[in-house]
Image (cartoon, grey):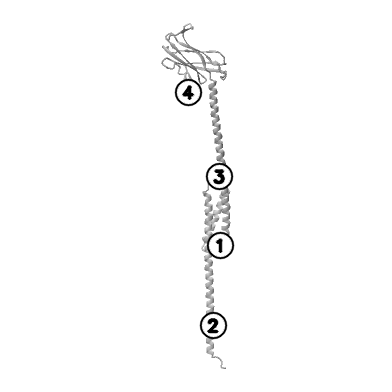
């Protein structure tokens, strides 16, 4: 059997070599294709996780912002905790904004977000508890305020009742004149008093009165003020003689001071007219301790 043609043998070797080269190239291309696809998938996965983490961080920031909308005064410790949380959020946002993140960076960010989420949850729980405590304290304060107002109103009512009672006692203790008698006199040069009934001859009045027995009246010195009105209704008094009654300053014609002992004593007030008497009816009013004691009249011819 003859040996194969050397030329054909060489051609076959070339064919084998080309087949091997083509197979190698196909293998390399397949490897590069699958590797590129894996890297592309990994890049997409990293970007997706980065977006998810960024969304989580924004949600956490919104939770913190809710706290500021609550009407709660934060302690220094809580304010410091919120400051640290916001600093951590800013760091995470900056890290997630990077163009590339390694798996190590991604895992670190995931752990930080998890810790931050837990921290904000605990922080919000504290604020919620604090808000409830404040609401309870406000309710207690309002309740105490209502109670205090109630007691204050009761105290004012009692004070008013006491004032009314004191006023009634004061009225009940007021002295009242009885048996008021007015006499007109002419005083002679000798000092002798002569009883008269004519205006032309009179120059003074003498008012005698007793006091109605009153066990409530204070047994002490009392001052009696006399006011005299002429027939025309004009007060006849010295403008410098003033006393107070019902919060008003009033002029008086004459005054005496006497000691009251709840007996049957008779008291006397003398009044000399600084003017000439005129015909007609004169009226007098007696006052003491802020009350009217009595009234009377006398007519001169």
Residue 172 place in picture, x, y as percent: 54, 21
Residue 73, position in %: x, y?
55, 46
Chain-order first, disc 1 or disc 4: 1
Q: Which secondary structure lies at badge 1?
A: helix
Q: Position of residue 134 (x, y in %)?
A: 56, 45
How far apart marks 1 and 4 lie (CA) works out to 92 Å
SS at badge 3: helix
Find the distance from the CA under tag 4 to the CA under tag 2: 138 Å
Which residue matches tag 4? 248
Q: Nearer the viewer, residue 230 or 26?
A: 230
Q: Decide which of tag 3 and tag 4 comes sooner along the chain.
A: 3
Q: Quick one: 40 or 144, which is closer to the camera?
A: 144
Indicate which disc residue 17 carries.
2
Label 1 vs label 3: CA separation? 43 Å
Seen in the picture, residue 268 relative to 103 is either above or below; the reply is above
Residue 91: where, in percent of width, then height?
54, 57
Is residue 269 depicted above or below 46 in this figure?
A: above
- Mark 4 crowd level (few <14, some 14–19, many ≥20, 10 Å Cα): few
Q: Which dot marks residue 106?
A: 1
Instruction: Name the N-terminal-most of marks 2 and 1.
Output: 2
Mark 1 and mark 4 residues within 8 Å of each other at the beta carbon: no
Q: Earlier in the sequence, mark 4 or mark 2?
A: 2
Does the image show residue 95?
no
């Amino acid at each position: 059997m003859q040996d194969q043609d050397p030329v054909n043998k060489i051609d076959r070797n070339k064919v084998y070599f080309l087949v091997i080269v083509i197979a190698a190239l196909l293998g390399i291309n397949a490897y590069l294709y699958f590797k590129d696809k894996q890297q592309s998938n990994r890049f997409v996965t990293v970007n997706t996780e980065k977006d998810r983490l960024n969304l989580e961080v924004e949600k956490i920031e919104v939770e913190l912002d809710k706290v500021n909308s609550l009407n709660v005064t934060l302690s220094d410790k809580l304010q410091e905790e919120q400051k640290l949380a916001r600093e951590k959020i800013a760091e995470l946002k900056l890290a997630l904004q990077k163009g590339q993140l390694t798996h190590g960076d991604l895992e670190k960010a995931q752990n930080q977000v998890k810790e931050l989420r837990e921290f904000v949850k605990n922080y919000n729980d504290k604020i919620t508890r604090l808000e409830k405590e404040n609401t309870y304290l406000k309710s207690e304060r309002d309740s105490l305020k209502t109670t205090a107002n109630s007691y204050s109103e009761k105290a004012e009512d009692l004070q008013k009742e006491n004032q009314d009672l004191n006023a009634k006692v004061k009225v009940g203790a007021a002295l009242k004149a009885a048996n008021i008698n007015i006499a007109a006199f002419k005083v002679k040069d000798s000092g002798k008093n002569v009883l008269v009934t004519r205006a032309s001859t009179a120059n003074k009045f003498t008012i005698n009165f007793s006091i109605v027995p009153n066990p409530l009246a204070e047994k002490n010195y009392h001052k009696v003020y006399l006011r005299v009105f002429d027939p025309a209704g004009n007060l006849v008094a010295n403008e410098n003689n003033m006393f107070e009654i019902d919060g008003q300053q009033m002029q008086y014609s004459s005054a005496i001071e006497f000691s009251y002992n709840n007996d049957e004593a008779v008291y006397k007030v003398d009044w000399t007219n600084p003017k000439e008497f005129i015909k007609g009816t004169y009226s007098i009013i007696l006052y003491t301790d802020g009350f009217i004691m009595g009234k009377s009249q006398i007519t001169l011819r």
